[in-house]
């Protein structure tokens, strides 16, 4: 069924609005997706504030030019082009489509290109961006990493509360004071008994005056006898 000019103008206006509001725009080539698969994809995209729109390449090209001032040649992109517009999280919508791309092993839907942070990205760059974790996923990981120390702290307070109640204490400080072991002061090392010093009276070795006199008289007597 042919589309009238009025209908084309309406579709173009809708595309321009979606492109203007989007934080990122992904272009995917679809071929044999079933109605059910399309419905599930669109439902998943709505959950993350994203949309999936199928339109003619010429209309998408005009919408991109008018809304963003970006010239994109979609004529060389294979198959029917679906436009993924992420309005809340720049990678959330890309991630939803990427999950389906992997699930169908690139046979029913594949990436073609994208516009991310106002710049046109080719196929390889689009694959990398589509594989990034969403903001929601990153926040979930952050919360999970914070739960471990918080739960440990909660267990500590719970145990301390039970100890206070069982021992009739009012503060944790009292509980800690009671549990502290008194550190006995180490006994002073025994001092060694001072060794008895043997003093030698040097004066005893010296002869007295009387002894010197006796020695002198003996020597004089011996000399006289000679």
Image (spheres, grey):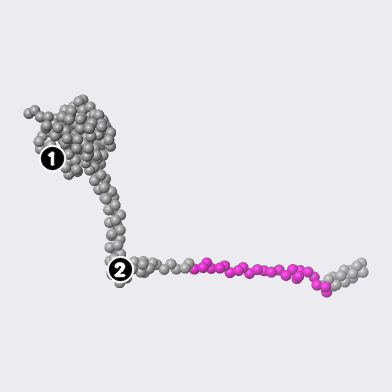
Mark 2: which secondary structure? helix
| Residue occupying the point 28% across, 59% down | 154
* 134 left or right, relative to 210: left
| Residue occupying the point 24% across, 42% down | 89
Instruction: Give the residue pinned by disc 1.
Output: 40
Residue furthest top as drawn = 76
| Residue occupying the point 38% across, 68% down | 177
Residue furthest left as drawn = 1
How many residues crowd around disc 2 within 10 Å: few (fewer than 14), some, or many (20 or more)?
Answer: some
Residue 207 location, quadrant: bottom right
How many residues crowd around disc 1 within 10 Å: few (fewer than 14), some, or many (20 or more)?
Answer: few
Q: Magenta stretch? A: 187-210
First-in-chain label (1 vs 2): 1
Instruction: Give the residue pinned by disc 2.
Output: 164
Residue 72 in picture, x, y percent from top left: 24, 29
* 45 left or right, relative to 173: left
**Residue 35 lies in the magenta stretch:** no
Residue 86 in picture, x, y percent from top left: 21, 39
Asked whether 122 or 194 is in front, the reply is 122
Q: Real-space Cα distance between discs 1 and 2?
A: 56 Å
Q: Is residue 41 above or below residue 144?
A: above
Q: In this view, does 196 lie above or below 105?
A: below
Asked whether 217 or 81 is in front, the reply is 81
């Amino acid at each position: 069924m042919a589309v009238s000019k009025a209908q084309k103008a309406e579709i173009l206006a809708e595309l321009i609005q979606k492109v203007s509001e989007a934080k990122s725009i992904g272009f995917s080539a679809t071929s044999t997706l079933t109605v059910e698969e399309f419905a599930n994809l669109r439902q998943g995209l709505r959950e993350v504030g994203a949309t999936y729109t199928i339109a003619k390449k010429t209309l998408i090209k005009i919408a991109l030019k008018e809304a963003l001032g970006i010239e994109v040649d979609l004529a060389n992109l294979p198959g029917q082009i679906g436009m993924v517009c992420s309005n809340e999280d720049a990678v959330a919508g890309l991630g939803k489509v990427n999950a389906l791309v992997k699930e169908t092993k690139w046979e029913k839907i594949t990436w073609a290109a994208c516009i991310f942070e106002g710049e046109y990205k080719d196929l390889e760059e689009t694959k990398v961006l589509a594989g990034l974790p969403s903001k929601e996923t990153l926040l979930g990981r952050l919360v999970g990493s914070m739960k471990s120390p918080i739960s440990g702290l909660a267990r500590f307070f719970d145990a301390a509360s039970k100890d206070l109640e069982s021992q009739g204490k009012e503060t944790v400080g009292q509980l800690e004071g009671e549990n502290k072991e008194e550190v006995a002061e180490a006994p002073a090392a025994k001092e060694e008994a001072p060794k008895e010093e043997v003093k030698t009276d040097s004066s005893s070795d010296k002869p007295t005056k009387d002894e010197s006199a006796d020695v002198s008289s003996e020597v004089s007597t011996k000399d006289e006898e000679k």
